[in-house]
Image: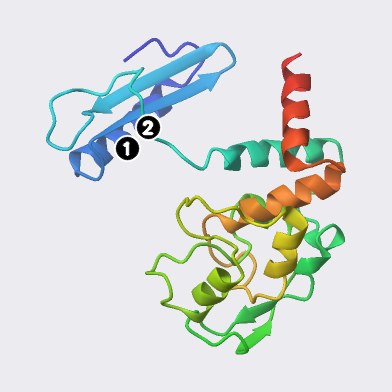
Amino acid sequence: MPNSGGLSKVRLGRMHEVMTGYVERGEVPGIVTLVCRRDEVHVDAIGNKMVNGRDPVRRDTIFRIASMTKPIAAVAAMILVEECKLRLDEPVDRLLPELGDRKVFKRLDAPLEETVPAERPITVRDLLTFRMGFGIVMAPPGTYPIQRAVSELQLFQGPPQPQTPPGPDEWIRRFGPLPLMHQPGEKWMYHTGSDLLGVLIARASGRPFERFSENASSSRSA
């Protein structure tokens, strides 16, 4: 194992064991993990590039990845938290009034009108942790009424497609009337929290999300 420097050898060993388990169980053919602390970098390459392959993954192996806007949005939101323009546990209603007075489905397969009131508001922390109560449903398209409603509103909750979603204000206007699938904080659901976070960042900063992210990146690296 590479020199751990200021990193904990015990915890690096635990991480290696966990990641090796995924490979040994056949859940993935190979994994590359990286941990960085100040100037210390630890890289661990385990397994092969392909199922039943013999070509091992290496530090410089190229992987297909996606959803990289999500960590950028999270960092941008935390910058605004540092600047006291956002607070982690404040309701988002202040800047996203479209998300006020939420309704929640009684059950996932319920018609759109079968709802109960949300037990509490959605917070910034809920958006960051994908626990706002709404996200991608891991089921074939059209399985549930909410999936059909999302499709009809052109909110594009599925895999990447060459479609152009509406602008942020129009997007959230369409999203606003939809019930949540779960109570805020109740369950992790992928994706939608990041979309809403982008709108929140734009309104909190007074600039489009992409412009704020670019400026924040350049100022932090200067």
Residue 69 picture location, percent across and down: 59, 40
Residue 202 picture location, percent across and down: 79, 46
Res 170 label: none
For the residue pair 44 and 137, the one nearer the viewer reads as 137
> Where on the picture, by quarter, is residue 114?
bottom right
With 140 as the anchor, is 187 left or right in this view? right
What is the spatial separation of the Cα atoms under label 2 and label 1, in whole angstroms?
5 Å
- Secondary element under disc 2, as helix, strand or loop, is helix
With 205 as the anchor, is 178 left or right in this view? left
For the residue pair 49 and 107, the one nearer the viewer reads as 49
Q: How many marks?
A: 2
Callout 2 amino acid: Met
Res 18 label: 1
Disc 2: which residue? 15
Disc 1 packing (10 Å; few <14; some 14–19; many ≥20): few
Disc 2 packing (10 Å; few <14; some 14–19; many ≥20): some
> Dividing the image into 4 quarters, which one contains the C terminus?
top right
Residue 139 picture location, percent across and down: 39, 69
Residue drawn at point x = 51 percent, y = 13 percent: 40
**Residue 142 in view here:** yes
User: Image height check: is 79 above or below 188?
Assistant: above
- Secondary element under disc 1, as helix, strand or loop, is helix
Callout 1 amino acid: Val
For the residue pair 117 and 211, the one nearer the viewer reads as 211
User: Image height check: is 115 above or below 165?
Assistant: below
Instruction: Tell me whether circle 2 and circle 1 mark residues in contact (CB < 8 Å).
Output: yes
Residue 96 picture location, percent across and down: 80, 60
